[in-house]
Image (spheres, grey):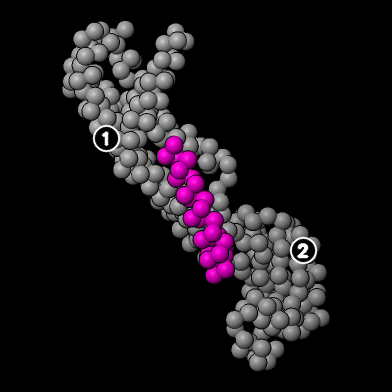
Amino acid sequence: MSSKLTYLFMRGVIRFFTILRGNFLSFLTLITVIFMYHIFWVAGTGTAGFLNHLSQANTIRVYLANNNDIIAEEILSSIKVLDNVTNAKYYSQKDAKAFAVANAPKAAALESFSEEFFPSFIEIYPSDTLEETLDKIVTEAGHIKGVDEVSYGKEYMVKFKAIGRGAWVFITVMSILFALSAVFVVYNTIKLSLYKYKEEIKLYSLVGATRPFISVPYLFGAFFLSLFAYICSLIIFAAAFIPFNSHILIKAGINIYDMPNITYFIFSCITVCIIGVISAKASVVSFLKQVSSINED
C-alpha cells in the first residue's frame, strides 16, 4: 500500500510539472485570482475594521448650560460618581479652543478665534462601549442640573455599524466569487491536461487500470499546482502591498490597512489547496465519464 501510494505521489509530481509547463497561462491566471483575493481581503477587512472603530464611542461629550467654572466643577463631581463612569475631565473655554486646534491641525484659522466662540464641556470616559451603558450614562448625566446637552454621536454609530455589516456581507459574497473563479481555473486546467493524455488514459483502461490509478496523480498535481500558485501570489502580495502601504498610504494619512496575521495565511492556503483538489476530482470524474468506463476497485 505504501509503495503504491508513493508511486502515485511521484506520478502526481510529474503531472504537476507537466501541467505547469503545458498550461502556464492558466497557472498565471490562478496566481492572479489568489493575489487579487489577498488585496481584496486586506482592503475589505481594513475598511470594515475602520468602520467598526468609528462605531465605538470611547467618550461622551457633556455641554454645559453656561460657562461658569465653579458650576462646571460641581457638575463634574456629580458625573464622576455615576455608575459605569471611569473618569471625566472638564474643558474650560480656553481648554476647548486648545482641544479644537490640536485635533484640527489644518484649520489654522481657529487660532484667531476668540475663546468665547468655544463652549466649555465635560468629557466622560465610560467603563465600556456597550450601547446600553452609554445610553444609561447619557440619561443620568442629562438629569444633572446645569447640563445643556449630552451626546456620544449615537446616530452616526448606528450608520457606521450598518455600513460595517454591509461591508462584511460584501466580503463574504466576493470571497465566494473568488473561490468559484479558482474552481473554474483549476477545473479547466486539469481537463486540458487530461485531454492531452486521452490516448494514454484509454490504454490504461484497456489493461484494467482503476479510477484511483488515473485520478490520484492528477489530484496530487492539482494540490501542488494550487500550493505553488498560493506561494507565488503571497510573494507578489508581500512585495507589492508592504511598500505601497508603508510608503504611500500611511504617508498620505491612510493608516487602516495591515498585513493579515498568520491565521489568515494558513487558513487561506488550506482553502486554496482544498479547492484545487476538489476541482481536480470533479474534472477527472467528468472526463472519465466522457472518455470510457474505467474498472472500479
Residue at 51 percent of width and 53 percent of height: 239
Q: Nearer the viewer, residue 25 or 172?
A: 25
Specify few, some or many for label 2: CA neighbours under 10 Å numbering under 14, 14-19, or 20 or more: some
Residue at 64 percent of width and 59 percent of height: 134
Q: Can residue 117 be seen in this view?
A: no
Q: In this view, does 78 lie to the left or right of 128?
A: right
Q: Main secondary structure of the magenta part?
A: helix
Q: Position of residue 228 (x, y in %)?
A: 44, 37
Q: Nearer the viewer, residue 91 or 245?
A: 245
Task: Residue under label 2, please give it.
Answer: 87
Q: Where is residue 2 in the image (x, y as percent from the top left)?
A: 47, 10
Q: What residue type is labelled 2?
A: Asn
User: In the image, which disc is placed on residue 231?
Assistant: none
Residue at 31 percent of width and 43 percent of height: 25
User: In the image, which disc is placed on residue 188?
Assistant: 1
Span highlighted in magenta in the image: 228-256
